[in-house]
């Protein structure tokens, strides 16, 4: 059953308001890793992939690197990202094949290799996310950062277009910066 655009935007707004509400949670016991993990889940819910590129019921999140977000992303395994079940797969290094990944989170241990990882993915329909500094500026899809006591994100529109992905306008409006406008 297809959801209407207004229904999707309403759910997006609620999810993003929830994330904004979580920000003070850093002082209330939620870790930075847990908040970033919530962002990753919500990005996976609302990105649109080209028709026929992913299954109707599964979405694969590949986590590249060691001790990425303190292992918090593994808690997403089996969770729902919209109508799809999220399957989390650990890839220890950049040499592992990432072509079967729908979402790729690149951990800080891959900081020296993240540009090569993005280049290797080419135009495959994969959403790349990381908390490596300048990630979106250097070609990643979404870069997470910590500024003014809150988690923010930047978007690289050229990377999104190259991967044939679509992000809702509401999501783009919440980005702290969008490269390639």
Image (spheres, helix red, strand yellow):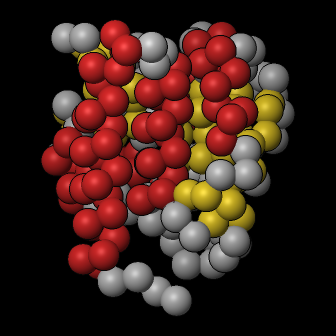
Which residue is at 66% across, 76% downward?
56
Image location (x, y in percent) of residue 38: 48, 37
Q: Is residue 137 visible to us here? A: no
Q: Is residue 45 visible to us here? A: yes
Q: Residue furthest front?
A: 28
Image location (x, y in percent) of residue 177: 20, 32
Which residue is at 73% across, 51% downward?
78
Camera-nearest residue between 105 and 96: 105
Question: As drawn, is 139 to the left or to the right of 1?
Answer: left
Question: As drawn, is 74 to the left or to the right of 135?
Answer: right
Which quarter of the picture shows residue 150?
A: top left
Which residue is at 33% across, 30% downward?
22
From the viewer's perspective, is residue 92 above or below residue 58? Answer: above
From the viewer's perspective, is residue 168 above or below residue 55? Answer: above
Image location (x, y in percent) of residue 43: 44, 48
Camera-nearest residue between 84 and 114: 84
Which quarter of the picture shows residue 165?
A: bottom left
Image location (x, y in percent) of residue 37: 52, 32
Question: As drawn, is 62 to the left or to the right of 155?
Answer: right
**How many discs appear?**
0
Which quarter of the picture shows residue 83?
A: bottom right
Question: As drawn, is 127 to the left or to the right of 70?
Answer: left
Camera-nearest residue between 113 and 130: 130
Camera-nearest residue between 101 and 84: 84
Which residue is at 45% across, 13% downward?
29
């Amino acid at each position: 059953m297809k959801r209407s655009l207004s229904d999707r935007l309403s759910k997006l707004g609620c999810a993003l308001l929830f994330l904004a509400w979580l920000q003070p949670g850093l002082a209330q016991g939620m870790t930075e890793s847990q908040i970033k993990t919530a962002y990753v889940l919500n990005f996976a819910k609302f990105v649109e992939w080209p028709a026929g590129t992913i299954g109707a019921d599964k979405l694969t999140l590949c986590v590249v690197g060691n001790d990425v977000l303190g292992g918090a992303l593994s808690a997403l395994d089996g969770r729902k990202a919209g109508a799809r079940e999220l399957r989390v797969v650990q890839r220890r290094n950049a040499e592992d094949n990432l072509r079967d990944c729908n979402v790729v989170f690149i951990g800080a241990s891959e900081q020296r290799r993240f540009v090569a990882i993005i280049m290797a993915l080419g135009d495959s329909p994969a959403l790349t996310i990381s908390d490596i500094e300048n990630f979106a500026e250097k070609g990643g899809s979404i870069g997470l950062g910590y500024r003014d006591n809150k988690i923010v994100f930047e978007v690289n529109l050229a990377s999104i277009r190259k991967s044939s992905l679509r992000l809702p306008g509401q999501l783009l409006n919440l980005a702290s910066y969008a490269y390639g406008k």
